Image (tube, coloured by chain):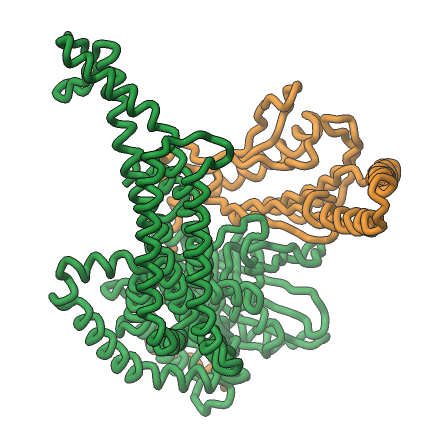
Chain colours: A green, B orange
Amino acid sequence: MVLKAFFPTCCASADSGLLVGRWVPEQSSAVVLAVVHFPFIPIQVKELLAQVQQASQVGVTVLGTWCHRRQEPEESLGHFLEGLGAIFSHKPWFQLCRERGSKSWSCKATHWQGPASPAASGEDQVMLIFYDQRKVLLSQLHPPTALPNRQAGDTTASAGGLAAVFDTVARSEALFQSDRFDEGPVRLSHWQSEGMEASILVELAKWAAGPVCLFLACLLSLISAASACRVFKLWPLSFIWSKLSTCEQLRHRLEQLTLIFSTQKAESPAQLMRKANMLVSVLLDVALGLMLLSWLHRKDLIGQLADALIPVADHVAEELQHLLQWLMGAPAGLKMNRALDQVLGRFFLYHIHLWISYIHLMSPFIERILWHVGLSACLGLTVALSILSDIIALLTFHIYCFYVYGARLYCLKIHGLSSLWRLFRGKKWNVLRQRVDSCSYDLDQLFIGTLLFTILVFLLPTTALYYLVFTLLRLLVVAVQGLIHLLVDLINSLPLYSLGLRLCRPYRLAAGVKFRVLEHETGRPLRLLMQVSGWPEGRSQMLRQPGPVWFSRECPESHLRRLQGAE
Amino acid sequence: MEDEQSFSDICGGRLALQRRFYSPSCLEFSLSCPRITLRSLTAVTCTVWLAAYGLFTLCENSMILSAAIFITLLGLLGYLHFVKIDHETLLIIDSLGIQMTSSYASGKESTTFIEMGQVNDVVINEAIYMQKVIYYLCILLKDPVEPHGISQVVPLFQSAKPRLDCLIEVYRSCQDILAHQKATSTSLEGGDKIISASNRRSHSGMGAYWHRQEDRR
């Protein structure tokens, strides 16, 4: 039977001592976590292991001996190490040995029968697998954190295979707390024995995170309570809030910030990653917004924008008037019905006249409004872009109105035509059965129906043309708004933290492991190196986060469907 | 122990199967695909440059020629890095798992590791590929829900596509190791109860033994 011994690469150059770790019987593998150096007192070693076992719920024991010797073998050390097997008896007892300066390793695993009959002990083949403790600890490939009611030293059948190894290393943080600068009774070698790895900034951030999160969570809950109060739920206001994309974006950001600054810890690494991504995207957003603000103020663009806005609105209105004059004439050589044409044309021209007067009324306040809107960029670039999209919607409100009128008229005409066409053929729509049935009409019904049908057919080209023109204009405006929303969506949902981790620390986003066979000599045990492999190169799925729902409202397919139904 | 044999793939190109026997429980197979030939490289480059020259004579814009050079270079680099596989390796470690590595011509390696607990069996399957019926080696993965069911089929040596004689060699060695692994796993289920019981023995009064050892030294 081949036993597996997982040995940390940092201990390969450590001095002789005892191997401390966990034995996983189902995998018949031993996970070595640290090496205890001479001199030590067995009682103290056992106390330390009992403490670690209680703190981490991992069954840490002494697994065997480690001997790192010079060229000439020391006989006394060899006997001494064998004698230790009787003190810390463990089945199987591992004896790893390495010659200093060479790559030849030897390991034996014996089943110690007792001091009386050493000859009856059996030996098994051992396979050495080296692993990098730091990367395995930080790669989070182990199952999620343990439930609180687990007993000490248990081995779960569900944590199968290598996940058990990762789980062991990840949960044994208590063993890695002491380094060689501590004056404790037991000297250990592990990945942090040269000094605990920590960053001052991270520690300060952790220390400050508690009160800051509490304060911000209270503030955010106040804001959300204020926004959820009954005043805003009244009909006109709630309708306006639902149509403005700025409110959606602000609500989305508020939700994200509440999640980030909530006082609960993240349950799983995936949630932690999501929170980190959200935080990074919020910070990037605010930074871009501040850059935009400084650029606007430096060139005094707001004043220029306000001055240019009225002439632009006038220009758009003039262009629309020209378009309507063209439609009222003979557009593209088509002959329109003169009376209907004039009625519709004059109706729309009057609307444009109203619109221009409204814009001129607002003109003194435009600069003030734009300045306040520009301030909102410090909340984030996405908010500024949403406000821009809303401003475009408000400025092109007349196009929207024209589209609605044209569409309603067209829809009415089509319904009338289809119903009268059925009458022409002697059929009727049965509302109860939702199907077309034959029906016998009276002569006068048929006569009037045919007349109306003819009238509607001849008025169809005019209405259809108006409908087509205004629908195209509306689609243009929707396309511009859609592009802006796409940009906002991109900033919202891009997982920048994960991308940064992929570049700087790929083992944090580990997806699996890979093995490499190291130099092998016959008669020596097989040595493998286990490496944590990064994000799989072939797959390029992005962990996009869900954004607010308004983009899907404006997506082209749904819009086309709505246009046909003329909502 | 290393061993090299020569086989052919389904199109008739030459493959080299290198077998490394590290121990009775660890085996590595390396199948190297046919290299890019100078002939095909020259043919592609000439075609692209002739087409670019043809466009140039039509449009009289010299940017087309430099664009053609860039496209050829970038295309070649992309092909070597993303498409052309140099050799594929299969590493089987008893009681640990099976690892497949594809090495691209630019040196990039893409690795997949499957734990032994998830492997149901290794078989040779038939498949219809274009107008041919070919054989391929694949790993059957266990279904977590049903103990004897199969959840996924993972094909091996997709780029090399060796013929049946090569596959049989690999198949025999894999089956030896899998059979050995299954035998040990069934014996382990009976034996581990004894081991875990003995680990819970208590140790007391060992301090006295330690001092006695010190005196002897």
Seen at 50% across and 32% down, the residue is A333
In x, y percent, where is residue B214? Answer: 50, 85
In x, y percent, where is residue B70? Answer: 79, 51
Q: Nearer the viewer, residue A147 or A285?
A: A285
Seen at 19% across and 62% down, the residue is A237
In x, y percent, where is residue B68? Answer: 81, 47
Mark count = 0
Seen at 55% across and 60% down, the residue is A532
**Above-or-below relation of A399 to A14:** above
Q: Nearer the viewer, residue A89 or A356?
A: A356
Residue A360 falls in image quadrant = bottom left
Q: Nearer the viewer, residue A296 or A41?
A: A296
In x, y percent, where is residue B146? Answer: 35, 35
**Above-or-below relation of A186 to A533:** below
**Above-or-below relation of B53 to A125:** above
Q: Work out whether residue B158 can be spotted.
A: yes
Q: Work out whether residue B37 can be spotted.
A: no
**Above-or-below relation of B200 to A178:** above
Q: Nearer the viewer, residue B155 or A30?
A: B155
Q: Quadrant of the C terminus of chain A?
A: top left
Residue ranking furthest to the bottom: A183
Seen at 51% across and 76% down, the residue is A190
Indicate left or right for A150 with A205 as reference: left
